[in-house]
Image (tube, coloured by chain):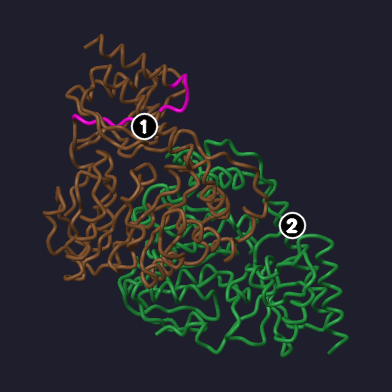
Chain colours: A green, B brown
Amino acid sequence: MVSSASSAGWDEPLLHGGDLAEARRLFPDAPEPFIDLSTGINPNPYPLSRLPVGVFARLPDADTLAALTAIAAQVYGAPSSAHVVAAPGTQILLPLVATLAPPGQAAVLTPSYGEFSRAAALAGHSITSVHDLAAIRAARLVFLANPNNPDGRLFSRNDLISLAENLRAHHGLLVVDEAFMDVAPAGASLAADVSAGNIVVLRSFGKFFGLAGLRLGFALAAPEMAARLTTMLGPWAVSGPAIVIGAKALADAAWIKKARRRLEDSAGKLDAILTKSGLNIVVGTNLFRLVRTDAASELFHHLGCAGILVRRFPEHANWLRFGLPANEKAWRRLQIALAAFQRSG
Amino acid sequence: MVSSASSAGWDEPLLHGGDLAEARRLFPDAPEPFIDLSTGINPNPYPLSRLPVGVFARLPDADTLAALTAIAAQVYGAPSSAHVVAAPGTQILLPLVATLAPPGQAAVLTPSYGEFSRAAALAGHSITSVHDLAAIRAARLVFLANPNNPDGRLFSRNDLISLAENLRAHHGLLVVDEAFMDVAPAGASLAADVSAGNIVVLRSFGKFFGLAGLRLGFALAAPEMAARLTTMLGPWAVSGPAIVIGAKALADAAWIKKARRRLEDSAGKLDAILTKSGLNIVVGTNLFRLVRTDAASELFHHLGCAGILVRRFPEHANWLRFGLPANEKAWRRLQIALAAFQRSG
């Protein structure tokens, strides 16, 4: 059985990031606007332009979708657009990808994104949690995130390719969720390696481009596997707005470069503020930072009362994940709240 | 095995409606703008207003989604919002709904929407095509559309409830796709009956509201089954724009009433034009009309050359389905093209 987060004596909700309505119920007296640092989403989204009504009204046609998968293949580095499956978010792909391996033992690298175990269990696998690549033996299915969420741990491309080769001997499938790869060092992605046949890479559009509400994500896989995923999704899985905005944003190399630099600066600034506040153990990616502190629970509530929502982890009571503030005002409120917490401690 | 449409010596594509890009390849010399009558989508969409950036940027929160399912329950007539599952289109729900019954014999009422058989086969069922309710015996799963697409055949609520009762004895599940129920006579929907436990109703948002590109659809089911579907979809299955626009449109009773009347008028006008053109055997719903004529293939090509795309059916060579023209200019072009065809015959 999978141990479910909600069974662990965790009575307050907010198991995923981004639920401000829930945050307002927990902290009814917090000052508004609430600052949401509970997700790993770029707080400065790709700029939207006006969309023609037809994008909402008509069924998305095959050519528009083909343009999206072509630019996605190019930007992510997949061998061709036949290796790319577009979906309404990678979330909905997880259980489908899990069915690409016949039910058996699934190894989930933990700690990581909680939905991996849920998706594997839905597809009939039994779950083993492992803590490093070496502990994976004859699994039918391996789920891991690279870079990892929430600790930012980066696996080398060579190590993952070796893992996939070992898995192949047992007809095992390696699924690498590269949701935060857009802000990782170059050369770490397995996108170019999916032709191997037993590697599936997931790429998230909404996090780096700051458009999580749009629901757009991709699976990169060998063409036969990609075709199977496309069949499972059925026609018109991705909305017209997601196709049009996605294709435009992915083609905007200048914005991508600028956003990457800006996120790097912001992550550095966040490190400085956290460290100055006595929070010394900080890891993560340039879209979030993870802090380890024995005062995590107190800090979560202190920030909540100050109208700042960060992410906590039911199974790791001393962890807190911080997303990036969107603007100067938010940076300032975070700085003041952290300073006050340090003084009160 | 399911007989697939593409295996039937059907060399030209356009198996689904709405693919204008493909139509332009088939009819490169047709006058523009191409008029798309190949779908059953309301050509006069619910008016869009400007959406706040946050709707695209943030992950949709639980409260916004709850508001959508609450109004959907009310408008469609489901017992409560716990009986409602929102999804990015009903299309993506079909294979998931098919897994709610253990693999076995699936009866698909034919002719109907081609995706039913595909979805049932994906979930491991073997398919039997049946032509009327009486022919359904101990099926594990029944897929039908009410009113039916493309012939508009309407099943009575009582007959379907009896069918569901018979199925229950063999733990069989009845799935009713009510994609065109918005324009059907009142009292035909099974929405209020899903508490029975072995009935799932699918409702499409995009057809009646003319916003098919948005991707929004619903499953109505008993709460336990609804929860299972929600689990399979995972978090954030529906986009922010779909939630916000969907909730607003469903709550707009005045627009709904007006649209229903307008569609009825348009369908009547289409009947008159078709009949006047010598096409006498016409059935359907107020979102489309189906014509039976031995000249179907010639008429499809004649209309295509005039820049008008209608829907044909690979397994029914004498069928053509006509959607509703959007405006006076489109009505006029259709009228002229049909008159010219009649003269040429």
| Marked residue chain, label 2 | A
Placement of the C terminus of chain A among the 4 image quadrants: bottom right
Q: Residue extending furthest top?
A: B343
Label 1 packing within 10 angstroms: few (<14), some (14-19), many (20+):
many
Residue B325: say if magenta.
yes
* Residue nearest the observer in this picture, A98 or B129: B129
A252 displayed left or right of A57: right
Against A21, residue B30 (above or below) is: above
Q: CA distance from mark 2 to mark 1?
A: 50 Å
Image location (x, y in percent) of residue B231: 43, 70
Label 2 packing within 10 angstroms: few (<14), some (14-19), many (20+):
some
Q: Which residues are magenta?
A: B318-330
Query: In terms of secondary structure, where does tag 2 sit?
Result: helix
Q: Which residue is mark 2?
A: A261
- Please tell me which residue is depicted at 32% across the width and 37% down the height of the picture: B285
Against B180, residue A341 (above or below) is: below
Q: Amino acid at mark 2?
A: Arg
Q: Which residue is mark 1?
A: B323
- Please tell me which residue is depicted at 41% across the width and 17% down the height of the picture: B333
Q: Amino acid at mark 1?
A: Gly
Residue A12: say if magenta.
no
| Marked residue chain, label 1 | B
Q: Quadrant of residue A326?
A: bottom right
Image location (x, y in percent) of residue A93: 44, 62
Placement of the N terminus of chain A among the 4 image quadrants: bottom left
Residue A85 can be seen in this image? no
